[in-house]
Image (cartoon, helix red, strand yellow):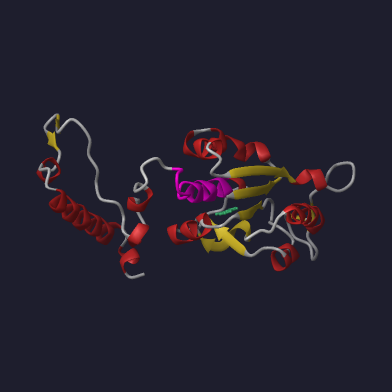
Amino acid sequence: MRIDIITVLPELIQSPFEASILKRAVDKGLVEVHMHDLRRYGLNKYNQVDDYQYGGGAGMVMMIEPIDKMITELSAARDYDEIIYMTPDGETLNQRTANHLSLKKNIIVLCGHYKGVDQRVRDLYVTREISIGDYVLSGGELGAAVLCDAVIRLIPGVISDETSALTDSFQDNLLAPPVYSRPAEYKGAKVPEILLSGNGPAIDKWREEQAFKRTQERRPDLLSE
Ligand code: ADE
C-alpha cells in the first residue's frame, strides 16, 4: 500500500511514521508513506497556499491551484483508489472504514487548514471526506496520522500476531473483553479463575460474554448497528 499525504506542515505528521508499529510496517516494505509539502506549488514568491474567502468573512481558504497541481503530479505517476480529505464535516472514522481502506493500493490524504479548502477541490478531486471525531483540530495532519495508524495496522503482516487485529475492539461491532497478565494475584486483586483453568472453549465463551457485557454497558449503540 502507498499513502501520499499532502500537507502544509510535513513536520507535524512525520514522527508517527518514525516510531512503533508504523515504522516497522514501513521498514518491512508493507506500506510506503510519502509527505508532500503543498508550498512546493505555492503561488508567488511567498509560496502562498491560502487566500481570503469570496463573500467576505474571517478565516483563510486553501486555494485550488496548488492542490490541483500537487494532485495532478501524483496522479500522473499512478492511479489512486481514493483521494481523502480530512475535515470535521466528513464521515466519522470507524473500524469499518479503516478495514475498507486497508485493502486499497494507493491513496492520497489531503490535510486541510484554516477554514478548509476551496469547495471546488472537494467537488472535483476528493472521493471521500473523513473526520476523526466531533471536535475541531487546528489542521488535518493529526487526523491523517490517526487515520494512517488505524489503517496500516490492519495490513497483513504489520502486526506480528496475525489474529491480534481481528480481536481488537470494534471488529464484530463489539468492544474487547478485559485482559490480564502475571501475576495471578497482585495486592489481593485476582485474575478471574476461568482464565487460569486451561479450558480453551470455556475461556472463549467467557471472553465473548465479557465483550458483550462491556459493549452493552459502554456502547449500546454498537449493538443496534
Ligand atoms: N481537521 C480539523 N478537524 C478535524 C477532524 N475532527 N477530523 C479530521 N480532520 C480535521
Which residue is rendered at x = 89% and y = 41% of the image? 45
Secondary structure character of the magenta stretch overall: helix
Q: Position of residue 41 (x, y in %)?
A: 82, 47
Q: Which residues are magenta?
A: 142-158
Q: Nearer the viewer, residue 127 or 123?
A: 127
Residue 12: say if magenta: no
Q: Nearer the viewer, residue 181 or 89?
A: 181
Residue 152: say if magenta: yes
Q: Quadrant of residue 219?
A: bottom left
Q: Is residue 50 left or right of residue 11?
A: right
Q: Is residue 58 left or right of residue 3?
A: right
Q: Is residue 50 left or right of residue 33?
A: right
Q: Position of residue 223 (x, y in %)?
A: 31, 66
Which residue is rendered at x = 34% and y = 66% of the image? 221
On screen, 48 above or below 125?
A: above
Q: Position of residue 17 (x, y in %)?
A: 56, 37
Q: How many dots with numbers?
A: 0
Q: Quadrant of residue 225?
A: bottom left
Q: Is residue 193 left or right of residue 85?
A: left
Q: Position of residue 21 (x, y in %)?
A: 47, 38
Which residue is rendered at x = 34% and y = 61% of the image? 172
Q: Residue furthest right?
A: 45
